[in-house]
Amino acid sequence: MRRSLLLLTAATTALVLTALLVPLTLLTRTHAADRTTAEATARAQWVAHALGPALATRDERETAEQTVESVNTQDLPTTSLVLADGTVIGAGPQRRSRAHVTDAIRLARTGRAFTYEPSTGGRQVLVPVQGAADGTAVVQVTLTERQLYAGTMTSWLVLAGIGVGLVLVGLLLADRLGSRLVGAARRLARTADRLAAGDLTARATPEGPPELRLVAGELNHLATRIDELLTAERENAADLAHRLRTPVAALRLDAETLRDSEEAHRIAADVAALERSVDDVIRKARRPFRDAPYADLAAVARERAAFWLPLAEDQGRTTEIAAISGTHPVPVPEDDLTAAIDALIGNVLDHTPLGTPFRVTVRTNPAGEAELSVADEGPGLPPTYAAERGTSGGGSTGLGLDIARRTAQDAGGTFDMASDAAHGTRVTLTFPQAARRPAETRPGRPGPTD
């Protein structure tokens, strides 16, 4: 925008200056010619006036010649005297010469003083000298092209300098105006970027032209409206999660009535874990901003694999935890990362035959990204299976893979799934490595038991 404004200003200023300066340059040329011609005419009249008495008698011819020679100095127009007999005085190195009598000289001998432009270029001024003894003589002042337009180049250079100066001033003013407009637009874009990144406290300052001020006001109104809608959604989610407390409490009471103490203790532990999960959902729903947006992928994967290990052993599955060592910080909240890993492992436990082995791997791929993969050796998914939200072939909600997908993509990573009957199913999530140390994970955090 700024460059376009500068180009537009430069083009407009150049066109306007061209329309003004071209006539001015022609005017200065004409003015220089008129001024030089006026000076030559005055010189010719003065010489004619001075030579009149000298040419009245033949004895004063020498004086006339001296007068003509005295006015012929360097860098001045050539002044000559054409006598009635055609003799020219002061026309060149020779004091006297014979000249061809032109029509212009004949016209001047009739008593008319005038200026004309010969075919050879330049300009000549002819003034008759009355009272000469041998007939009317003519004073002739010859101007060359250089003498006629002397000083024109200087005037043109001055006009060009003025034109360049005006263009630069126009560009400077346009740059200041463009800087103001572009600065306001960029600040508005930065506010929009902050809102897109989840900072709902960002507000734009109305500045610049009326259109940008209007956009800033509407953007602030949109941000306020989004904040209100998200607040309402968080409250609704918290209310829905709170409704689960009643059936969970009833389930806990039912567990306490079991006669088998060991079974009652196990179910009570599961119910307690479910209660803590519901509490986590309520706290997360009411929290407008996430407190710990970084987590250690390796630590969370180790924790969740250890959590699911007892159930996997009950189902006769061989579980391999491959290369989960060191730290792999990723820009994902710990609870979101936990939900994604639980969804992937839960899919293996729920939708593959009993005894099917699976493997959880965390590593750094060649691109420098943290990579999590959950692979099983089951029969694979049907060819027509579509991993879309709400779509499931096993009677579930169909949200598990979508949760994993959104967790990776929201962090700037990728989701990939490969499945066939020979090699089973592999789901791979990649995450960009976090630039700072993640928040410490909480070992032994319980999760769902389904």
Image (cartoon, rainbow, N blue to C red):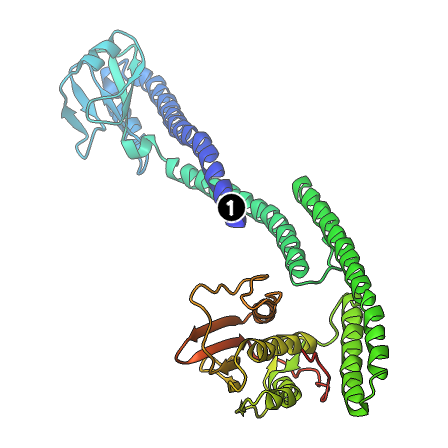
- Does residue 321 appear in this view? yes
Nearest the viewer among 447 and 21 is 447
Q: Position of residue 253 (x, y in %)?
A: 86, 78
- The vertical placement of 266 against 275, above or below, is below
Q: Nearer the viewer, residue 392 or 225?
A: 392
Residue 444 found in image quarter: bottom right
User: Residue 144: which quarter of the image?
Assistant: top left
Image spot of residue 262 (x, y percent): 78, 92
Left or right side of 226 for 56: left
The residue at which mark 1 appears reads as 6
**Which residue appears at 50% of the width and 46% of the height?**
4
**Residue 370 in the image: above or below residue 96:** below
Q: Residue furthest top?
A: 110
Q: Quadrant of the C terminus?
A: bottom right
| Helix, strand or loop status at disc 1 | helix
Side of 355 where 244 appears, left or right: right
Give the percent coordinates (x, y) of residue 301.
61, 85
Answer yes or no: is residue 141 visible.
no
Left or right side of 100 for 26: right
Where is residue 83 shown, x and y percent of the image? 21, 17
Q: Residue at x 33, y 21 (%)?
A: 44
Hey, what amino acid is under mark 1? Leu
Viewer-proximal residue among 3 and 189: 189
